[in-house]
Amino acid sequence: MSINGIEVPVVADVVGGHTGRLDDFKGGVESIIRLRPEYPLVTLQGIEEFSHLMVTWYFHEGSPDDVALHARSPRDNPAWPATGTWLHHNHRRPARIATSFPRLLRVNGRDLHVLDLDADDGTPVIDFVVCFQEMLPRGPVTQPKWPSEMLQNYWRDAKER
């Protein structure tokens, strides 16, 4: 895949899961990250020992016309402050790339069965790696009130396991 002149390999594809570019209710849904055949199965060796993946994927249903290089209220809700492009976790950023942290349920050949991946069916995956606890944010994570209000239903049906 070529993104803004940078060649980025697509290593896998999302199979199943979400459809329809929903803003909320991303939790509790199983999907598959299917490793493409040009990558040998040995590249997955040992992955089943980890609980979570960090998946980098491309908003393939968006277009360059969707990009918004200005401050705007999240979800066009005037109750939330206008914020710049880099504060929005959606397809309106120039690279249209996202990162998710789904739970790895099981591995079946090239299929990584995951829970709570917020990418739609058919999404190209440009990278994934197991989560090392030591590589997650250190110290307190701070944010204003509006993201919690906006995302109160994002993972609504997620189950703690």
Image (tube, rainbow, N blue to C red):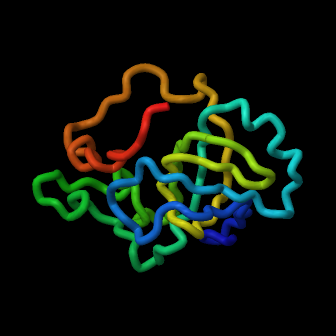
Residue 83: x, y in percent?
25, 53
Residue at the extreme top = 139
Q: Which of the 4 image quadrants contains residue 50?
A: top right
Residues 1 and 46: in front is 46
Residue 71: x, y in percent?
26, 60
> Is residue 124 placed above or below 149 in the rendered structure?
below
> Is residue 51 placed above or below 102 in the rendered structure?
above
Residues 105 and 10: in front is 105
Residue 38: x, y in percent?
86, 63
> Which residue is rendered at x = 16% and y = 60% of the image?
77
| Total numbered labels | 0
Residues 159 and 129: in front is 159
Q: Quick check: 56 left or right of 29?
A: right
Q: Quick check: 80 left or right of 102?
A: left
Residue at the extreme left = 79
Q: Image quadrant for the N terminus? A: bottom right
> Which residue is rendered at x = 84% and y = 63% of the image?
37
Q: Quick check: 148 left or right of 124?
A: left
Residues 26 and 5: in front is 26
> Which residue is rendered at x = 24% and y = 49% of the image?
150
> Is residue 123 placed above or below 106 in the rendered structure?
below
Q: Which of the 4 image quadrants contains residue 65?
A: bottom left
> Which residue is rendered at x = 69% and y = 50% of the image?
112
> Is residue 131 placed above or below 108 in the rendered structure?
above
Q: Quick check: 3 left or right of 77?
A: right
